[in-house]
Structure formats: C-alpha cells, structure tokens
Amino acid sequence: MDNQQAQNVALRERVKELTCLYSLAQLVEPSGISLAEILQGAAELLPPAWQYPELTAGRVFFDGQSYATANFKEGGQIQSASIVVNGKPRGRVDVAYLKDMPPAHEGPFLREERRLIDAIARQIALIIERRQAEEDRFRLQDQLRHADRLATIGQLAAGVAHELNEPLGNILGFAQLAQKHQGLPRSISQDLTKIVATCLHARQIITSLLLFSRQMPPQKARLHLNAVVEEAMGLLEPRCSQNGIVIVRHLSGDLPEIIADASQLRQVLVDLAVNAVHAMPDGGVLEVATQVSGDRVVLSVQDNGVGMSNEVLEKIFVPFFTTKDINEGTGLGLPVVHGIITSHGGTIRVQSAPGLGSRFDIEMPINADENAHGDRMDDSTR
C-alpha cells in the first residue's frame, strides 16, 4: 500500500510538471504578447506545479526586472535555477515556500522539482532567444528597406541635380551680366541681387544633393583639422554674434595631420553650426573641440540649445527630414554630414535630450588611405 501511495504521489507530481511545461509553451502562442507578459505568466505557472501549491510563490527575475506572484517575498526556503541566454546568465527562476516545510531531497524540495525548475529556466531562455532572433530579423529588414530607400533617393537626387544645374547656371550668369549694366533703376538692381542670391542658395542645395548621392567624390589631401575649424568658425562668427551666440574653441595643440577633403569638412562644420544656431533662438554657447583618441582625431560640436527628442534623433540622418519651417531647411544638412564623414572612413555619434542641447562627436582616422572613398551610406555609425 505504501508503494502504491508513493507511485500515486509521483504520478501526480509528474502530471503537474507536464502541465506546467505545456502551459509555458502555450504562453507564447498569442500574437502580439510582450516578453514581459510571458515572464509574468511564467511566474504565475510556478506555484501549482510544486508540492505545496497553496504555500508556494514564484518569481522570474530577468535583466534586472522582477516578475512575481503577488505573495512572493524574499528569504525563507527558496529553490532557484539560472536563466542562461546565448551562454550568458541573464536572470533566474525562483520558487519560494511561504513557511518552513519538512525536508525532502533538496531542502524541502523534491528531486523532481529540481528537474522541473531547471527545465523551466531552459524553456524561458529558449523563448527569449527566439524573441531576440525575431527582433534582429525585423531590425535587419528595416535596415535593408532603409538602405534601398537611400539608394533610390540618391539616384533621384543626382538626376534632379544634374538637370537643374545647367538652367540654374544660365539664370545666374545672365543675372550677374545684367547687374553690370550702368544706370539700372534701383528696384531692378535690387531684384537682380535677389535673383543672384537665390541662385547661389539653390546651387548650394544642388551641391548638397550631389554630395549626398556620391556624385562629387572627395578631393583628399593632408591637412590640419584645426585650420579647417578656424576657417569655418571665422565664416560663422558674424552670424553667431548677431544671434547672441558665443563660439568657444577647445582645439588640441598637438593634433596630427589627417587625409581629408578640406572643403567637405568645412561644409560639415558649417552644417552642424547652422543647426546649432537654429537650436539656440535666444542665444547660447557653441563649443567646438578637437582632440586625439588613439589612431583617430575627434571633432566635437556642442550647443546648449533646445535639444532633440529620441523620436527626432532616430530620423536626423534620413534625407529630407527636417523640424524647421517651410523655406527654412531642406532636410539634407545632416544626411550630407553623415555621407561626408562615412566617405572619409569616419564615424559620427549624437547625444541630445530636450532642454539639454546636442553634441556631435566625429572621429576621423589619422592614417587613412588617400585614395580610399566611401561607396555607400549606411546606419552603422549612428
């Protein structure tokens, strides 16, 4: 009779184990369920699978977050198993008795319960691995779609720029010739000046389009980055002064030469500085710094302006995205900056938060190949 009773207990425990594992597998079936919901559900499945379900509490602890039954508390008799994801411990499964229970094979816990909690931890790890693999696949698909859009936009931009260049050059040339006529009425002279200024602005946009589409490869040579910074800041100081913005330089005195296109780096600085000016409508401080970090030169541009939200940060390198009003921005400045830096073998990082300003850190290789050119734009440096 004792043997039969023991077999009945073992069978009952086995049924509870299988029910728990089956229910855990069923948790992931509904589409749209979050990982947090799965882990909380797993914690709720633990007590019924143990020897004293009415006195049992469960918890899944993962990446610093706790998912537990309402009655869970620290201390006392606890059985645990590690959650190991891709070879790295990321958390654990805990089963706790709410009061001291008589000894069994592992403290108050049965040998079968040890096997069960280990199986649950492995199953949770597999669920997490599958979720992460799925997220990586979706992320890769998004990157591929984004790269395809960039390629299409680049081809379109190059075509439009080439088509506009010739008629725009004719308009600019004839307007400049007309300006040379003596005795022009004042109103006509003013109109011609506006035409010339507008043509020059449009030509700058076309140059940005060509740079973005890689139709203007960099003309690289050895140069001192500090000299490029001083030249660019000299151009921008009058505008900054008019807007109540102070430029502060922190330029390293022992900066080595780099191989780069001076005009393109100057455009990078101008684009970043103009963005900073727009971000400080009530004035502020624009800091420009250079330093050496290992085998790279670092250029930093920082403002104390309005800053950017995470939603805006995700899109700042997307062509034609802009937060400026109509006629105030083309949405090409930062994509062109990104393209220039990547074509030089460099990287760009951005830190920003609403009300805390923005900081752009650009790293350029010191010993880059003078003939190397970037052939594509991707998101790996953001």
Image (cartoon, grey):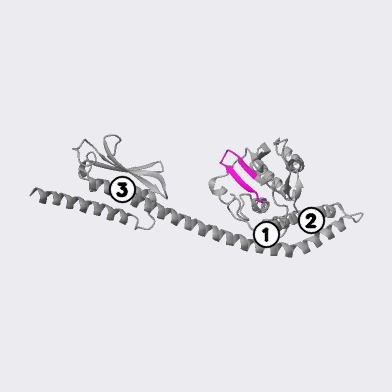
Which image quadrant for residue 304?
A: top right
Tell me if 104 is positioned left or right of 31 in this view.
left
Q: Determine if residue 283 is in view.
A: no
**Residue 263, x across and y down, in percent:** 75, 50
Who's the residue at 62% across and 62% down the image? 151
Q: From the top left corner, tell me how far across and down residue 121 is, in percent.
A: 33, 48
Amino acid type of the residue tagged 2 in the rendering? Ile
What amino acid type is highlighted by mark number 1?
A: Ser
Circle 1 SS class: loop
The location of residue 341, given as percent across then percent down, is 66, 50
Residue furthest out toward the left: 1
Label 3 sits on residue: 118
Tag 3: amino acid: Asp
- 147 with respect to 209 (left or right): left
Residue numbers of the magenta segment: 345-362
Q: Distance between the residues labelled 3 and 2?
A: 77 Å
> How many residues crowd around disc 3 within 10 Å: few (fewer than 14), some, or many (20 or more)?
some
SS at circle 3: helix
Q: Is residue 188 above or below residue 155?
A: above
Label 2: which residue?
Answer: 195
**Mark 1 lies on residue:** 213
